[in-house]
């Protein structure tokens, strides 16, 4: 059967709101117009194998190889693809010649950026390897699309027209305000990244801050940036795992921003118990994490195996735990829930900014990490933004308290209003 006819049959569903361009120049217009400013481009007939049956991993690898492209608004196209009902069941199997080409394409899968992390799942050794796979890519690469402060988590766009830099500073301030951070208090940042939060907490709030990370690159970069602070204010950055941390004294405040996704739901009880142990009575814990919003697939019609594209190429062993399970685990550890806030739309905007910056400097990115890995990040940012827009995933801030024997918590405002003015 003619591959063009197979493609036409695959994409005939009236629910499709994105255009498809084929290798021979054939254009399959969108049956339903939604104003999507982009299209899917199939550059070779072998791409059809990824749709028969639909496989998220094979579709992703076709994109990494350049056989499948997204032109124009990548987030909008993927958002439309996420609402599509999927390939038509009327499409027939590929003829032998095209199936042979598809097998050759699959043989290339896993080259360039494929995650191989040894050891028992979520052991200290394997968690370190998983973190290093993602964060130790290249600091110069991350500088291409992150803000000047190198904050690699959801920003807080407190007003229309805010820049990414303004929104990330607002997020750091929001975290400190939710923690009611006061001068001289000991703050632990679990998974401190490149040190932006501990720097902000020390410089703006006078906290005695400590950051921990499993990434050697991030630890070195964080220590270098913190040299600019006076010695008496300078935070400490340790290459350490939260499970093995033994501080000289408990912390009054703890923050974990974008780190819990690496913990795994089977270890949530251990995670919250460890933070509870590190926190002084009356202390506060701000847990900021991405969660499953009711179906983590950006493309629900595509079969997902082996953890999917994100797990295999971007964040190995990551787990987006639904919010109710997180709250229940925190309660089992002895925490009192004080506040829960969704920032889902803020993360969609953050990813839109990151993607625009990466696309604008894509050739530099490819030169730093290789074209295939740079394409993997382009797909990861675009697909994640689409998933946030669709509500398939969400992000939340959970404020927890370790009640003292008296039950009284000092310094907490009576309403949320005190948190936001300075974050605008």
Image (cartoon, rainbow, N blue to C red):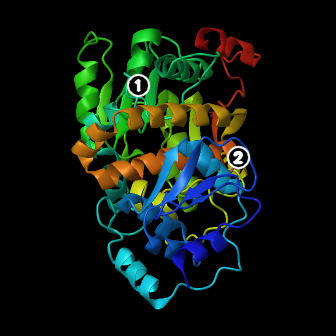
Relative placement, left or right, of 415 versus 329 is: right
Q: Nearer the viewer, residue 374 or 103?
A: 103
Q: Nearer the viewer, residue 390 or 191?
A: 390
Residue at screen point 43% across, 59% down: 63
The reply to whether dot 1 and dot 2 touch (C-beta < 8 Å) is no
Disc 1 element: loop
User: Which quadrant does the N terminus fall into?
Assistant: bottom right
Per the rendering, the mark at residue 147 is 1
Q: Nearer the viewer, residue 406 or 219?
A: 219
Q: Nearer the viewer, residue 79 or 284?
A: 79
Disc 2 element: loop
Residue at screen point 56% across, 24% down: 175
User: Which quadrant does the C terminus fall into?
Assistant: top right
Position of 120 relative to 409 (above/below) = below
x and y, in percent, of residue 35 in the image: 69, 41
Position of 243 relative to 220 (above/below) = below
Relative placement, left or right, of 1 versus 370 is: right
x and y, in percent, of residue 290 in the image: 59, 45
Per the rendering, the mark at residue 391 is 2
Sequence-wise, the earlier of marks 1 and 2 is 1
For the question of whether residue 290 can be seen, the reply is no
x and y, in percent, of residue 375 in the image: 38, 51
């Amino acid at each position: 059967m003619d591959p063009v006819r197979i493609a036409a049959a695959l994409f005939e569903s009236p629910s499709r709101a994105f255009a498809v361009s084929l290798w021979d120049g054939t254009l399959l217009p969108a049956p339903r117009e939604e104003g999507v400013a982009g299209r899917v481009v199939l550059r070779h007939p072998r791409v059809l194998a990824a749709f028969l049956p639909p496989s998220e991993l094979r579709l992703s690898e076709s994109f990494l190889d350049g056989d499948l492209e997204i032109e124009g608004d990548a987030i909008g196209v993927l958002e439309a693809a996420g609402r599509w009902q999927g390939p038509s069941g009327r499409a027939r199997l590929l003829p032998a010649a095209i199936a042979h080409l598809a097998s050759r394409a699959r043989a290339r899968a896993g080259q360039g950026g494929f995650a191989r992390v040894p050891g028992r799942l979520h052991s200290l050794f394997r968690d370190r390897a998983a973190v290093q796979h993602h964060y130790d890519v290249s600091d110069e690469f991350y500088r291409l699309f992150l803000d000047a402060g190198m904050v690699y988590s959801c920003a807080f766009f407190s007003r229309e027209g805010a820049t990414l830099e303004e929104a990330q500073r607002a997020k750091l301030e929001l975290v400190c305000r939710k923690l009611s951070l006061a001068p001289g208090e000991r703050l632990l940042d679990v998974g401190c990244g490149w040190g932006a939060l501990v720097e902000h907490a020390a410089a703006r709030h006078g906290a005695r801050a400590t950051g921990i990370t499993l990434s050697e690159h991030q630890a070195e970069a964080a220590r270098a940036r913190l040299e600019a602070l006076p010695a008496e204010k300078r935070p400490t950055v340790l290459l350490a795992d939260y499970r093995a941390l033994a501080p000289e004294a408990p912390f009054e405040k703890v923050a974990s921003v974008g780190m819990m996704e690496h913990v795994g739901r089977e270890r949530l009880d251990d995670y919250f118990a460890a933070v509870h142990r590190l926190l002084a009575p009356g202390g506060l814990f701000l847990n900021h994490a991405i969660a499953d919003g009711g179906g983590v697939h950006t493309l629900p019609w595509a079969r997902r195996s082996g953890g999917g594209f994100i797990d295999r190429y971007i964040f190995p062993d990551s787990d987006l735990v639904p919010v109710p399970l997180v709250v229940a685990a925190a309660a089992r550890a002895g925490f009192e829930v004080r506040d829960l806030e969704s920032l889902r739309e803020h993360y969609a905007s953050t990813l839109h900014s990151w993607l625009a910056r990466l696309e604008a400097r894509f050739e530099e990115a490819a030169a730093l990490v290789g074209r295939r890995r740079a394409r993997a990040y382009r797909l990861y940012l675009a697909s994640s933004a689409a998933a946030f827009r669709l509500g398939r995933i969400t992000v939340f801030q959970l404020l927890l308290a370790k009640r003292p024997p008296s039950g009284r918590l000092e310094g907490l405002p009576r309403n949320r209003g005190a948190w936001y003015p300075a974050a605008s």
